């Protein structure tokens, strides 16, 4: 008897659907280092228009689009202001130092959501002793914040500080579409606020590979050069871009379903003896804290034995992520399994 595994480790584990594979199969292709891949060009134009921004660049990963974005806005010795929980700081292999030679100023906040006042407090005065503060990075949704969404009014206030103090403003929008769907906001509102935006096509949108960096023509001109230096120039990658375009055109609105399922599972987890607390569920990520007197590693192994895959996000923290390869039936079965599970 083999039951389908319910993989909640990440929304990156999805398989391209039959329709998506069909688009990939029939995508017109060319050499993108010459700028001649029609499918990549179509995706870049579509995304730039969606955000009301001038241009976009298709890259291999969200780490690459974030790192290129950071490099565009900084010089070695500069300082990047970001949250202590942010992906650009925690999960990109020290890339801010490695690729850009910049230092970081970490803001301590609740769930990765800081304020314009905190940004202001962390900008260095113009003084030869201090690193030059040149960039603010925010993440929406916040992965380590349990999929938390920003209040767009706070982002507008931060933008105002950045403009007044001459800092650039970059958005790590790996899961921005989850925030847009949860909040009923538009991509254009975000396009107006940021100098550069990184979005991932291979998370909840279900494409196998790819991210986009959005910005002005001048930013993307620079970005293309940096991507090449990083070894990220691709050839007939339109086969991947076709999947990304399909994802943007078909898989955005359905994210609401993942959010609803995360809430459904949250209701079940609330009653379980091994769960200490759950971070507020806003989108497709659920982070819970296990009871301090229990070994979380053993709980994860126990879930695994029942065909449920989850991951650790640090001491006592366990993450469940909801995505398009889970059916309503899978989620109902998950709820039943969780309710009956002895740890
Ligand atoms: C996944 C993710 C990225 C990019 O990761 P890649 O695996 O390099 O595509 C960036 N930021 C956040 C918040 C993410 O969750």
Image (tube, grey):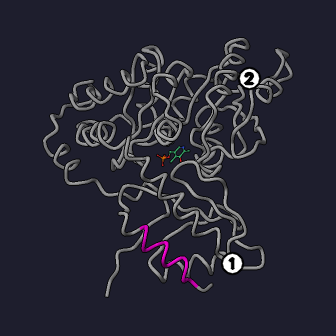
Q: Dot 1 surroundings within 10 Å: few (below 14), some, or many (20 or more)?
A: few
Q: Quadrant of the N terminus?
A: bottom left
Q: Is residue 50 above or below residue 54?
A: below
Q: Position of residue 123 (x, y in %)?
A: 79, 23
Residue at screen point 46% across, 28% down:
186
Instruction: Find numbered disc 2 in the image and state the secondary structure of the residue it sits on.
Output: strand
* Residues packed near mark 2 inside 10 Å, few (<14), some (14 to 19) or many (20 plus): many
At 56% from the left and 66% from the top, the residue drawn is 311
Residue assigned mark 1: 273
* Relative image position of residue 252 (x, y in whole percent): 38, 41
Would you identify the image quadrant in which residue 152 lies? top right
Q: How many marks?
A: 2
Label 1 secondary element: loop
Indicate the quadrant where residue 268 lies: bottom right
Q: Is residue 339 magenta?
A: yes
Q: Quadrant of residue 82?
A: top right
Mark 1 CB within 8 Å of ligand 1: no
- Residue for point 46% across, 72% down: 334
Give the mark nearest the N terminus, 2 or 1: 2
The part of the chain drawn in magenta is 331-341
Say if mark 2 contacts mark 1, CB within 8 Å.
no
Residue 40 drawn above or below residue 16: above
Mark 2 to mark 1 CA distance (whole Å): 47 Å
- Point out the frontmost of discs 2 and 1: 1
The majority secondary structure of the magenta stretch comes to helix
Residue at position x 65%, y 25% from top? 153
Quadrant in the picture for the C terminus: bottom right
The front one of 95 and 206 is: 206
Residue 335 % position (x, y): 49, 72
Question: Which residue is labeled 2 in the image?
Answer: 133
Counting from the top left corner in percent of width and height, residue 275 is at: 68, 71
């Amino acid at each position: 008897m083999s039951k389908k595994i319910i993989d909640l480790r990440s929304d990156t584990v999805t398989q391209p659907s039959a329709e998506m594979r069909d688009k990939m199969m029939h995508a017109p292709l060319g050499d993108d280092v010459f700028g001649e891949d029609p499918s990549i060009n179509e995706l870049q134009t579509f995304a730039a228009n969606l955000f009301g921004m001038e241009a976009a660049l298709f890259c291999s990963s969200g780490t690459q689009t974030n790192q290129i974005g950071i490099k565009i806005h900084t010089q070695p010795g500069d300082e990047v202001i970001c949250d202590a929980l942010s992906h650009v700081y925690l999960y990109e292999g020290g890339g801010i130092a490695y690729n850009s030679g910049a230092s970081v100023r970490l803001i301590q906040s609740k769930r990765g959501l800081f304020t314009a006042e905190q940004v202001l407090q962390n900008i260095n005065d113009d003084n030869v002793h201090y690193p030059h503060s040149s960039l603010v990075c925010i993440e929406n949704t916040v992965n380590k914040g349990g999929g938390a969404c920003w209040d767009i009014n706070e982002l507008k206030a931060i933008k105002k500080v950045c403009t007044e103090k001459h800092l650039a403003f970059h958005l790590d929008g790996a899961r921005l579409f989850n925030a847009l769907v949860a909040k009923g906001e538009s991509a254009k509102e975000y396009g107006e606020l940021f100098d550069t935006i990184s979005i991932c096509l291979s998370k909840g949108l279900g494409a196998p590979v790819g991210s986009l960096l959005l910005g002005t023509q001048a930013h993307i001109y620079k970005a293309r050069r940096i991507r090449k230096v990083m070894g990220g120039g691709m050839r007939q990658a339109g086969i991947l871009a076709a999947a990304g375009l399909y994802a943007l055109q078909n898989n955005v609105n359905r994210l609401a379903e993942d959010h609803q399922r995360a809430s459904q599972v949250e209701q079940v987890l609330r009653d379980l003896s091994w769960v200490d607390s759950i971070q507020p569920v806003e989108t497709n990520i659920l982070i819970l804290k296990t009871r301090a007197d229990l070994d979380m590693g053993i709980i994860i192994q126990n879930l695994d034995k029942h065909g449920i895959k989850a991951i650790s996000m640090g001491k006592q923290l366990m993450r469940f992520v909801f995505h398009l390869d889970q059916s309503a039936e899978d989620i109902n079965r998950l709820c039943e399994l969780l309710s009956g599970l002895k740890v």
